[in-house]
Amino acid sequence: MGCGFGGGKNYVLSAEPMTDPVQTDIVKLDRLGIGVGTYGDRPFLVPGTLPGECISATVLGGGQYQSYGKVRDWTVKSPHRVEPPCVHAGSCGGCTLQHMSLDFQQDWKRSRLLDGLSQAGLHEIEVRELVSLEKGSAFRGKAQFMLQCQEDETWEIGLYATRSNTLIALDSCWVQDTLTQQLLEGLNQQLRQRFVAPGLKGVLGRSNGKGVLLTWLLTEKPSPQTRTVLKEAGQSIPGVVGCFYHLSPQEGNALIGKETVHLSGATSLEYQVRDVVFSAGPVSFVQTTLEGAELLVDEVRRRAPQSIEHLVDLYGGVGLFALALGKRAKSVTVVERDGPSARDGQENLKGMGTYVCGDVSRVKDQIAPMDVMVVDPPRAGLSSPVIEWIGMESKPRQLVYVSCSESTLIRDLQALLSMGYQVSDVTPVDLFPHTPHLELVTHLHRVD
């Protein structure tokens, strides 16, 4: 929903300046793309700044290890600075890097990966050129926004400001595709009316380029009257082909819980990624951009052999990679924990392979020996038991690792290298322009 400052909880937030303006030179970017200067003897984090810039800044907070602030003016500006194309840039907490040119964003992301590998002693690993989307706007097929009810019972829709519960109302979003942008406009129109929906927390929209599934996120089960309000509001928005509500956790920042209820229209969307066709429901995991999913499929296919005895796809979700490689394999097994993605994956893989539903570490005995494995774990990466099973027991001849976290990938590579694997190469894939996020596709093979 928006990126925060690096460094954990070692500073406090303050709405008021703590000192008079200070001068500092920005010497680098932290892992989230925030400019780092110096205040006193500590690092000074200033969002919206670039290396090589000299700025005047207001100190807004600090802790034992660092301070943070807000830029007031520039004495020297970087040649890589651009005017943010979105009017909400710098406030909504979403696209935090819009002040950087796209070329600079991509160079920095690849350099960050190289630095991380080098610091871990993995400097000999080949890092290929970064692969990116063709455009930096209108690429997101997933729309996830928060809602707040006003005193007059109308609602505002938008994103939270960075490290804040302050909602920044949005009437447009520069990175949403045509249908999810249309959804945002329709929701604004509906929510400006007197809209009675207790427990309404946010909305989730999923687009396949042809239609949108709209899911209302609630913290309590709706009454029959509220169900009718939600259904009719969804049906009135152009492009919406299916409407749902989902019970979201009442506490914490998580939006996705366990119960989704269909209200009207389609129950799923059909997606096409290259020649792969699959279906997914409103809260199943599908890459935010279909063009980005195509880039990942291309990279996975490039690394997998043309002839596979048994392919195992761990954390396979709706089955994208298994379907993409299925014609090369004599047999296919997909593993995913129970949930919406697994239920959709079981349908997508019918007649093609075996779908094992459960936590990888608990169902590993149900998986036959394999020669090729694809893993696409969550941000936390592979757990120690799963790494040990891969490296010491199952020992696939080739392993393709798709990661959304450089730090956990590097940690896992260190473990796998100690278990008889060698890294062929890593390709960074930029699916999320204007954010610090990066996907990584790594090819490993056994050397023993």
Image (tube, grey):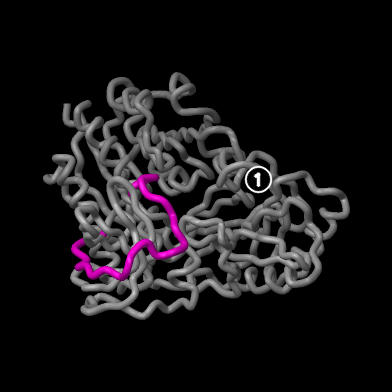
Which residue is label 1 attached to?
248
Q: Nearer the viewer, residue 295 or 39?
A: 39
* Quarter occupied by residue 225: bottom right
Toward the left, the furthest residue is 124
Depicted 312 relative to depicted 197: above or below: above
Residue at point 13%, 46% (across, down): 123
Residue at point 27%, 32% (across, down): 397
Callout 1, which amino acid? Ser
Magenta segment includes 112: no
Q: Secondary structure at mark 1?
A: loop
Residue 283 rendering spot, x and y as whole percentages = 61, 49
Image quarter in which the C terminus is found: top left
Residue 204 rendering spot, x and y as whole percentages = 62, 57
Q: Nearer the viewer, residue 267 or 151?
A: 151
Q: Residues within 10 Å of mark 1 (few under 14, many from 20)?
A: many
Q: Nearer the viewer, residue 430 or 152?
A: 152
Magenta-highlighted residues: 7-29
**In the rendered view, does 140 fall on the left or right side of 183?**
left
Magenta segment includes 24: yes
Residue at point 60%, 43% (across, down): 344
Residue 312 rendering spot, x and y as whole percentages = 41, 34
Q: Main secondary structure of the magenta part?
A: loop
Can the viewer see residue 79 in this picture? no
Toward the right, the furthest residue is 225
Residue at point 52%, 59% (across, down): 272
